[in-house]
Amino acid sequence: MKAGMWAIALTLLLAPAAAAQQRPAVAPPSGHLERAQAEFQAGRYAEALEEARRAADSAPTSVRALTARASMAEFLGEFNEARTFYDRAVALAPDDPGVIYHTASFAVRVGEYDRALGLLDRLLALHPRHVRWLFQWAPRVAQAWLLRENPSLEHIVQIKIDILTEKGDLEQARTLARAYAIVKADQNYCGEAQAKQQASAGRDEIFKAFRLATLGQPDSADCIWWYGQWLSDEGYVRLGRLMVLEGTRVTPLAGNKESGTRYVRIRLGGDRDVPKRAEQLFLIARQRYLRDGDLEGATRLFDEVIRLAPAFARPYNYRAMIAWDLGDREGALGWLQRGIQADPDSWRTHRNLGKLLDAVERYPEAETHLKKAVALFTDDAGGRLALARVLYAQGKYDEFVKETRGAVGFLANWNDQVPEVRAFLEKFERWGPGAALPPAPDPHVIIGWNYD
């Protein structure tokens, strides 16, 4: 997401507006805009936004400065500010294709689909009549060439496909993708996506590959399912939910159908409402916390997400982690308890609460939540090892052995031997209990903090 958003910002900061010659000349923005660009490139995003604000304030009739401010505000989750300055830019340059496109993209981001479609129609109307005619009526064989020659047309198609997909109309999205040769009938998109995932390709590449598989191969249940899981891990709860449900619908296997239903319930909040604006603010808040270390900005955005989507468990997990970072252990436990009240079937929230209760040596309470986590997701080997640890701490040695053996056996199927866990178990079985608690396994067992 960082690279994609930077591409947008770079275009807005460096490229002249497409319709500049149609507007009266105005004073250019000050050097603030160039400094904003430099700050952004250096990863100092808050400072970049401050410079973009100064640029827009010093040149209030500069479309370039207004749009740059809107774009950087959007990047940092300041959506009200972004909306204000996109609107000002559109008012000054109603026929500027770049401004219209980015305003439409922002409208999709906050779930204003009808507004986005109206802006896309305006963008299409700016093209020459013969291009519009070809776009609407030319046969499929000509569309690939047409979109290649007119990138703005491809932008229109891709955004419309995204809108249809997000609204749950996959059939229409696929029809549109075929009509404009975005996907072709004889291509194995699913195989290509799996290859990119196995090769640990970049996030943008993986996203695009699985998106094409979903559009181009409607029966590829496994790829649609994995796309949904990948989206879920990346934080795209709404689209992740749609894809998991679609993969569950088209799979012929009863076991997979059951797994899909369970996954949506314990990982994606079931049918709890998560507005698009809330989801996007959550994604940005997570970046401001993990990427930027901006606890104040992240906290403010997480709190706004909770206000917009009180039944969405994930932001409570992050608020707990921020409290823990600040040394407020009781506050961290309180946020996780609120998360469970919001979504009692949130596997990771139960697991995180169990881990924190273990850390403060409240073992009986930790046991309750870790048992719930394992009951929700029986293949959670890391959760079983965490449960085994608190069972051991309470002297429940038979249960400790059972849970540890189960987790070790499961992990062995994935060539993960967890040697430190095996060594502790072997020592216990030979010599009995000791003073030390079982070790916490390596992070790849997913035993530590799991925010989402």
Image (cartoon, rainbow, N blue to C red):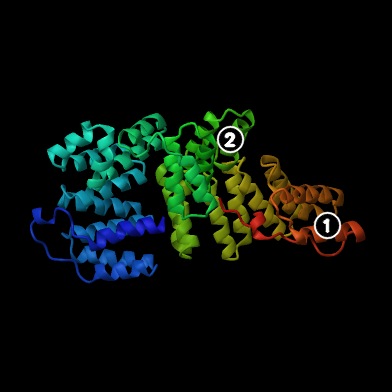
Q: Name the residue under label 1.
A: 425
Q: Residue, x 20% and y 43% (percent of image)?
A: 123
Q: Name the residue under label 2.
A: 260
Judge from the rendering whether residue 249 lies leftward or rightward of residue 88; answer left or right.
right
Amino acid type at mark 2 = Gly
| x and y, in percent, of residue 354 in the image | 68, 52
Q: Residue, x 16% and y 42% (percent of image)?
A: 127
The quarter of the displayed image where residue 186 is located: top left
Judge from the rendering whether residue 34 lies leftward or rightward of residue 304; answer left or right.
left
| x and y, in percent, of residue 70 in the image | 28, 56
Q: Residue, x 22% and y 36% (percent of image)?
A: 135
Going from N to C along the chain, the mark reached first, 1 or 2, is 2
Q: Is residue 324 depicted above or below 376 in this figure?
A: below
Q: Counting other residues with Cα less than 10 Å from the Cα at mark 2, is it few (<14), some (14-19), or many (20 or more)?
A: many
Per the image, label 1 sits on a secondary structure element best described as: helix
Q: Is residue 365 visible?
A: no
